[in-house]
Image: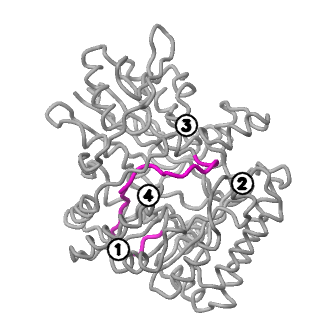
Amino acid sequence: MQITLISPPQNYSKTQETAGVVPPLGLAYLAAVLDPEKYQVKIIDAVGEKYWQTYSWQDHGLRGLTFEEILAVIPPDTKVVGISNLYTFAFFVASEIARQIRKRYPDIKIVLGGAHPTVMTRQTMSRPDIDFVILSEGEITFPELLTAIEKGSGWEEIDGLAYRKDGEIVINPKKKFIKDLDTIPFPRRDLLPMQNYFKAKEPHGSASRDKWTTMIATRGCPYGCSFCNTPQIWQRRWRPRSPKNVVDEIEMLNREYGVEEIHFEDESLTTDPKWVVEFSRELKGRGLNVVWQTSNGTRAESITEETLDIMIEGGCTQIVVAAESGSPRILRDVIDKRLDLNAVVRSVKLARKRRVFIACYFMLGLPDERVSDVMKSIWLAMKLAFLGADEVVFSVFSPLPGSRLLERLIKEGKVHVGDQFFSGLTPHGDMLVSKSYSDYIGDRQVVFLKFYGYGCFYLTKLIFHPFKIVRSIRNVAKGIQEIKTERALRTWIMRFLGKEHQGRTE
């Protein structure tokens, strides 16, 4: 039985920072759990296959394979197509792929999975071209669904599955989660264009080595921040793979692909400091020439002197601390993030004395946020720059379906969830187009505050750590990535000069 798994083209804007050319690990995990004697699997990573190609579709800018190119490489004997839909703003692209597949191959069963279909299941299933939605993790659900499709029935009993019965949408709630993640095979990277990821060199963070890749060592997050939909996807469960299992995968990647750098995309990698210590020691004990970073963020409280030293000994080169706001009021009353800002300051103080880069993330334009709250974030960013922080990221809040903040905005009548809302969500990282959800900060004002925050941070860094600025300028000129800002700056410069991915026309 032929199965085709598709990662759609990427939403693209010339004014956004690079959104990342990374392996679609979710699809690679699904491919790994399918019996090779029963299923032939093809993965089409639209971005990875043609990351240098950009084009327009309707009112959207896209990057990667065109819809026609995707259709052209779907094996004609395909029985089931699985489409990944991680982000809400990408839903229209995923649903358009489903529509065009249905038009050309009317008998193919089409399945959607990912964060958006999981939290917006009924809205996703309202598209007639989509036959099924898999909620949350699919390593058990997807094989069970394929068996049911072969039999022509049986999906009524499958956990975490949405389908139609007599024209009505039926949603089986997700109740079963994999307890032992070590039982899942490593993702099928052999079905992905690994060399293209190396050549693009566009991770979510920064790649200091030529051969890098992403990994997931844990699933879920035990915290309940109101801006995040992770609790709705994973039910606030945090499940780690064993340190040995994670290092086994790293060793395999090093051996088979020459990978020298790992970027962990976990929601909360450092939740258990004991796990971090065991992992770091296991990796160091293998003697592999591999470095790693927490590119998706960590809790500041987990960064202690002992833990950080062991992480660095185990190859950690960069940590990202997610402060979100410098205003205790916003942390406490708006986003429900129980964070001691002193822990953020302490983590930067610890990092500056060691050979590790540290970044801090903030959000702007949150509901109830005032300019005075933003200034507290900027002031904290300046303090961190003075203490030696290497970079800061100011992102504009975007309401995620399934999050408590979106539910609040809906109740207040400030957001009406529908196609217009989904289409209007700004792709991550657009530097000039943003929407503020604060009654006290306008759309243009939040863009100004974002640039003002960057200016204050880097001016402080220039004054107190000028050699770091000089080093970054040198890195940008030479195409070296030590921090994300250097990668983004070079990308914008090359894009402005018309030389981004120059020569890639095949």
Mark nearer the N terminus (4 vs 3): 3
Is the stretch drawn in magenta largely helix, strand or loop?
Answer: loop
Identify the secondary structure beneath mark 4: loop
Q: Which residues make up the magenta segment?
A: 206-228
Q: Quadrant of residue 329?
A: bottom right
According to the picture, the residue beneath numbered tag 2 turns out to be 433
Mark nearer the N terminus (1 vs 3): 3
Q: Is residue 23 left or right of residue 348?
A: left
Mark nearer the N terminus (2 vs 3): 3
According to the picture, the residue beneath numbered tag 1 turns out to be 291
Instruction: Name the mark nearer the viewer: 4 or 3.
Output: 4
Where residue 250 appears, x then y in whole percent? 27, 64
Instruction: Find out whether the residues at labels 1 and 4 contact each other: C-beta distance under 8 Å.
Output: no
According to the picture, the residue beneath numbered tag 3 turns out to be 91
Residue pushed farthest top? Answer: 166
According to the picture, the residue beneath numbered tag 4 turns out to be 265
Instruction: For marks 1 and 4, give the CA distance.
Output: 15 Å
Q: Nearer the viewer, residue 328 or 389?
A: 328
Residue 182 vs 381, above or below: the answer is above
Identify the secondary structure beneath mark 2: loop
Instruction: For marks 1 and 3, give the CA distance.
Output: 34 Å
Q: For the C terminus, which image quadrant?
A: bottom left
Q: Residue at x 72, y 59 (%)?
A: 364
